[in-house]
Amino acid sequence: MVRLLLAERSGSVFRSGLMVAGLTTLLALLLALPAMAAKRAKETVKPSAPDLLMDGGRKLSFERSFSLEREVKPKRSFWTRVVDVIAGPPDFHYLVSPYSVVTDSRGRILVSDVAAAGVHIFDFEQQKYKFLSRRDARKDPMLTPQCVAVDAQDNIYVTDSQSGKIFVFDANGKYRRVIGSLKGGEGYFKRPTGIAVDSVAQRIYVTDTLRNKIFMMDMQGNVLQAIGKTGTGDGEFNFPTELRLHGEDLAVVDAMNFRVQVFDRSGTFRYTIGKIGDGAGWMFRPKGIGFDSESHLYVVDGQWGVVQVFDEQGQLLYYFGGKGTGAEQFQLPTGLDIDNHDRIYVVDSFNRRVQVFQYYGATQAADGRKQP
């Protein structure tokens, strides 16, 4: 009996020793985390790209890139890190095959992800992240989200190139409805790609790439007008893709005609920019487009890995980028968006990230503040 009590007591002491040792090791790991993180950060810091200086005091600066949910809230509390050590780090979302990008009035960045079958919403100001998905929905699943747009109330519109539909979510990411869903589950569109919303006129514009048309709809999805037809002339298309509204203009990427066509909002042709080629100012794989505060047109070329910038006369002003994995380098770039502060967001698809640039126009000081 005495031997048994001593054995149990020894086992208890042994287990207590293990617990103390485990806690000591855990504490040591937690204390070492800041130093380890600082060391990793120091080791992985890469020099940023130099500013691109232009005439009239204009300047383009590289700001940063992002690709992970974790980057939205980089500072984790002590007890959160305790849980990470014990249970393992959480399964963060990350960009897999990003395609399109848009910013809303809250400063959030929305990125469609074809491979992940959803839309990432990065809110760096509020340190929040959300992922929109309907892949497992029984009715009207969202299968291959292509392009994303927002309206004046920050409602979210997503084209699905596989299902042939447009999915609508409210500003908080709650699913509201689908546009183009027919009886039997088929979609009205053959391959919807680019999308833009005119909140004032209550119009939705969407490119149907395989039909070589743009459909103008009301907010309920009723088709009001079809713009364009197959061809190479003015107002004709050969695989139209991205759309962008700017002022009174509707710009359309006419991909296989290697150009961007510009219409007014009623669908009347105005002018075209670009032609096929591998020289400066020419286009080979035009993708995302956008306009800055000076009405310059930005065009992503996925083949050459650059962004070209044109004036309203179609003259090339400058370009930036190049193939690679460093800052201001791209691998198969696709989407582009420019917010109201002239921040430029470029989807660097094959590098699985979004790169952010800041454009300073002629009316801005060198430090980025607007002149009075």
Image (tube, helix red, strand yellow):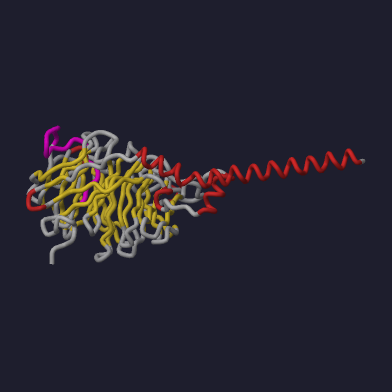
Question: From this viewpoint, is residue 46 visible?
Answer: yes
Left or right, residue 296 beside residue 123? left
Q: Residue at x 54, y 43 (%)?
A: 29
Locate the N terminus and report the quarter of the image it occupies: top right
**Nearest the eye: 95 or 232:** 95
Quarter-wise, where is residue 372 in the image? bottom left
Residue farthest toward the right in the current orientation of the protein: 1
In the rendering, at what x and y percent does residue 22 appear?
63, 43
Residue 281, magenta (yes or no): yes
Q: Residue at x 61, y 45 (%)?
A: 24
Q: Magenta segment, which residues?
A: 276-290
In the rendering, at what x and y percent does residue 367 appear?
18, 56
In the rendering, at what x and y percent does residue 44 appear?
36, 38
**Nearest the eye: 264 or 333:** 333
Magenta segment, principal secondary structure? loop
Left or right, residue 78 beside residue 257? right
In the rendering, at what x and y percent does residue 119 appear?
39, 49
Say if 172 sits above or below 37 in the image: below
**Nearest the eye: 233 or 292:** 292
Say if 278 sits above or below 119 in the image: above
User: How many numbered marks are there?
Assistant: 0
Question: From this viewpoint, is residue 332 visible?
Answer: no
Left or right, residue 86 beside residue 109? right
**Nearest the eye: 119 or 218:** 119
